[in-house]
Image: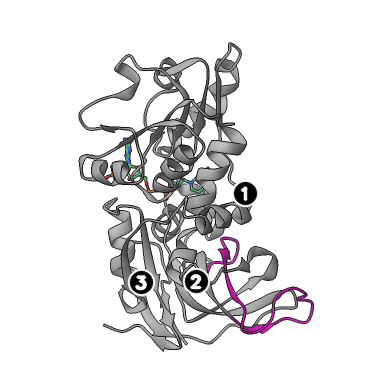
Amino acid sequence: MKAAVRRRYGSPDVVEVEEIEEPSPSDDEVLIQVNAVSLNSSDWEFLTGTPAYVRAWGLLRPRYKVLGSDIAGRVEAVGKSVKKLRPGDEVFGDILGCWGGLAEYTCAPEDSLMLKPASMSFEQASAMPQAALVALQGLCDKGRIQSGQRVLINGAGGGAGTFAVQLAKSLGAEVTGVDSARKLELMRSVGADYVIDYTQEDFTKNGQRYDLILDLAACRSVFDNKRALSPKGSYVAVGGSLARILEVLFLGPLLSMGGRKMGILGAQANKGMARMVELFEAGTVVPVIDRTYALTEAAEALRYLGEGQALGKVVVAVCEGGDFHKR
Ligand SMILES: NC(=O)c1ccc[n+]([C@@H]2O[C@H](COP(=O)([O-])OP(=O)(O)OC[C@H]3O[C@@H](n4cnc5c(N)ncnc54)[C@H](OP(=O)(O)O)[C@@H]3O)[C@@H](O)[C@H]2O)c1
């Protein structure tokens, strides 16, 4: 089968599409013909080997040669202990523990997959797992969002941010989206009431107060973020600079002793997907896909993601109706 393979850490230049052996499922796994895979920051981190903690999965050379964890495809074969899925089922999910999505076939435990609704394309399904669930878990589970709240989403023009804006609006919040200038229109189009270009304005210094801040691009100190919270407001750090995330981890509990709360989201793979599917089917939340690449263009797709250019999600379409994409 064809796969986008890399054997060392580095830039997208280390990725090459080549023929490798098709994987075979263990007892609790299914073999999936991959139709689409969306890229996440984790793909970039595991590609480049930075930040350093990803080297726990291969100090000098990466353990996983094929990246790609948010997949959608069709079940080809099932292992002996698989109970729910059958060959022919259309599935999607986050297979972060296994990787291997940037390939024509991959294997994953059946528990990491759910049935794809017919109304959702494979590309849309692949765009959902990490990004939609970071938004859901960050706003609802950790942030306990309430209707009528003033919610700020930092990094609102990216993969998770575009889901978060739609979700927060659907839950009755007044939403401010923060991102770079070229993403202002996108943030408005998915429902943001107010938008801020972070290169022009620091939301922690403009005198506004928010009931909930979902920070997908943490780059300001916890003290600055605390200042932007209303007296009972919550700050949820999701991603961004490792130094800032560690700051929230260690200082957040101390700073949460007044009325405000400051903490980190540790997202759980695939938790809450059924709810996101319902919102998709109701037309409330729609994945924003910026570009779709062919598998042969996997390196370009990763480069585009790494440059931070993407307006929403970047998808690699591997095969459609059995015909593999080629350009
Ligand atoms: N905590 C968890 O369990 C968990 C799980 C999954 C993912 N994550 C993390 O969640 C984060 C968001 O994921 P994603 O897929 O949405 O990433 P993404 O698509 O790269 O989006 C991040 C957005 O933040 C913007 N941005 C960069 N610097 C900014 C700044 N200083 N102020 C405001 N916005 C800024 C980027 O735009 P520009 O590049 O144009 O500036 C981009 O639009 C990532 O860091 C990821 O690692 C965390």
Residue labelled 3 has its Cβ within 8 Å of some atom of ligand 1: no
In percent of width and height, residue 284 lies at 47, 50
Residue labelled 2 has its Cβ within 8 Å of some atom of ligand 1: no
Q: Nearer the viewer, mark 2 or mark 3?
A: 2
**Residue where numbered disc 3 is placed:** 15
**Residue where numbered disc 1 is placed:** 268
Q: Is residue 269 visible?
A: no
What amino acid is found at the position of numbered circle 2 in the picture? Gly
What amino acid is found at the position of numbered circle 3 in the picture? Val
- Kindly give the residue lying farthest to the front in the view shown: 282
Dominant secondary-structure state across the stretch colored magenta: loop
**Dot 2 or dot 3, earlier in sequence:** 3
How many residues crowd mark 1 within 10 Å: few (<14), some (14–19), many (20+)?
Answer: few
- Horizontally, is 239 left or right of 99 in the view? left
Label 2 vs label 1: CA separation?
19 Å
How many residues crowd mark 3 within 10 Å: few (<14), some (14–19), many (20+)?
Answer: many
How many residues crowd mark 2 within 10 Å: few (<14), some (14–19), many (20+)?
Answer: many
In percent of width and height, residue 201 lies at 24, 26
Circle 2: element type:
loop
> Within the magenta stretch, is there residue 96?
yes
* Foreground pick, 272 / 38: 272
- Horizontally, is 324 left or right of 133 in the view? left
**Residue where numbered disc 2 is placed:** 101
What amino acid is found at the position of numbered circle 1 in the picture? Gln
Q: Is residue 199 visible?
A: yes
Residue segment shown in magenta: 75-99
Q: Are marks 2 and 1 in contact (CB under 8 Å)?
A: no
